[in-house]
Amino acid sequence: MRTKTLIATLLAPAAVQAGLNDLAVRAGLKYFGTALGESAVNSDATYASIISDKSEFGQLVPENGQKWDSTEPSQGQFNYASGDITANKAKANGQLMRCHALIWHSQLPSWVSSPTWTKEALTAVMQSHINNVMGHYKGQCYAWDVINEAVNDDGNWRDSVYLRTFSTDYFPLSFKLAKAADPNTKLYYNDYNLEYNGAKTDRAVELVKIIQAAGAPIDGVGFQGHLIVGGTPGRSSLATALKRFTALGVEVAYTELDIRHSSLPASASAQVTQGNDYANVVGSCLDTAGCVGVTVWGFSDKYSWVPSTFSGAGDALIYDKDFNKKAAWTSVSSVLAAKATNPPASSSTAVVTSTKTTTFSTITTVASSTKTTSTAASTTTSAGGPEQTRWGQCAGLSYSGPTKCQAPWTCQYQNDWYSQCL
Ligand code: G3I
């Protein structure tokens, strides 16, 4: 008996932390996902292994492979080699795929962007592109970003070959063409800086209304979430911006989340602030009925578009360059776990308030425990007293619920405020 116990102890896995996607689903979201860097996944085994873990990332989106310059670099010559990297991974791992992006002024080959088109000729080009690309991925995309970044930061419509040719009529046109190509995927408008709820957000609201008024289908709005540490709006302000769109009857999601440090190296307190900012973004999605998920734009600081675009800035993601989980990871995990455990009470109260050194040996943030411990519905009672079910909270500061877990789950430390049956 003693030998058996010893062997079991020796074979017991090291403490396992719940994956972000598992927590997100438990908290009521459809997914927690990431962009997939096409070259990183083929060259870096650690990267490939983490991104293939569905408990961590339940949804993938190609960082570049489905854009026009990849899929139709020359007119009528379609190439899906790069886009299929993500599609094949998602299929193999049972992950959802967001698909990105069809009508966008950037990464658009010059054979499309340079000529002056008639409306008829450009419509035919768009229809061919949309039919071919959406046709190739038909049935595989949870959602498609049909139009990307059609609004300038100052709130004016963004200049592009599409705007010059159609004025705003290309908004409903694109969505109608997309609906005809694949009627069963969600059709999204996707943009950045909508989070600040200013002139750009106003204009994006108008864009949705233009599409709806024309009788065209639009299902969602993607908040890209390319944000800055210390400059990220608070949780309720973020939720207010999201709710302007759900009020129009569309769903919303964070589609490209990263929160960059303006200068490097990031101090310990800047890392804490980054964690708080991440928690506020994810929390705002949890607070918004109709916010379906959060996607980070890559997960490791080893591979990110940020430093090449914003000189001196970076470290915007939730894993560091060596694939260690950062304070931001713990912060996201905590805010999801709080909601997963106490769906009604925690949604508006879980805020990150303090710092703590954890087993990750980094400064990390933790969720405050202002929520009530309304876990009774998910517990059972055995001869030995109440037992928590899988995922349920089993310990933590201010926690007074069951501390035993149903077999085979064990109570595993996440942070001082939160241990979980896993
Ligand atoms: O593939 C070529 C390679 O053949 C060539 O040798 C190399 C030389 O520079 O360039 C490679 O292409 C680069 C491509 O990423 C793939 O790595 C492009 O130069 C580079 O501009 C491109 O950057 C991408 C950027 O979109 C383009 O606008 C970033 O990786 C990608 O993260 C970024 O993603 C966008 C979203 O799609 C929309 N929202 C904003 C977001 C960040 O900019």
Image (cartoon, grey):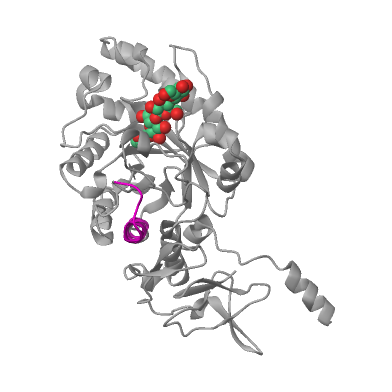
Residue 206 horizontal side relative to residue 70, left or right: left
Figure quadrant of residue 123: top left
Q: Which residues are magenta?
A: 263-283
In the rendered image, residue 273, in percent from the top left (x then y), is placed at 31, 59
Q: Is residue 270 magenta?
A: yes
In-front residue for pair 184/274: 274
Residue 63 visible to an observer of this rendering: yes
Q: Main secondary structure of the magenta part?
A: helix
In the rendered image, residue 177, in percent from the top left (x then y), is placed at 38, 26
- Quadrant of the rendering where the N terminus is positioned: bottom right
Residue drawn 52% across the image and 32% down it: 38
In-front residue for pair 397/267: 267
In-front residue for pair 132/74: 74
In the rendered image, residue 95, in percent from the top left (x then y), is placed at 56, 45
Residue drawn 27% across the image and 21% down it: 162
Residue 194 horizontal side relative to residue 358, left or right: left
Figure quadrant of residue 43: top right
Q: Quadrant of ligand 1?
A: top left
Above or below residue 365? Residue 293 is: above
Residue 90 horizontal side relative to residue 11, left or right: left
Residue 180 visible to an observer of this rendering: no
- Quadrant of the rendering where the C terminus is positioned: bottom right
In the rendered image, residue 224, in percent from the top left (x then y), is placed at 34, 43
Residue 210 horizontal side relative to residue 379, left or right: left
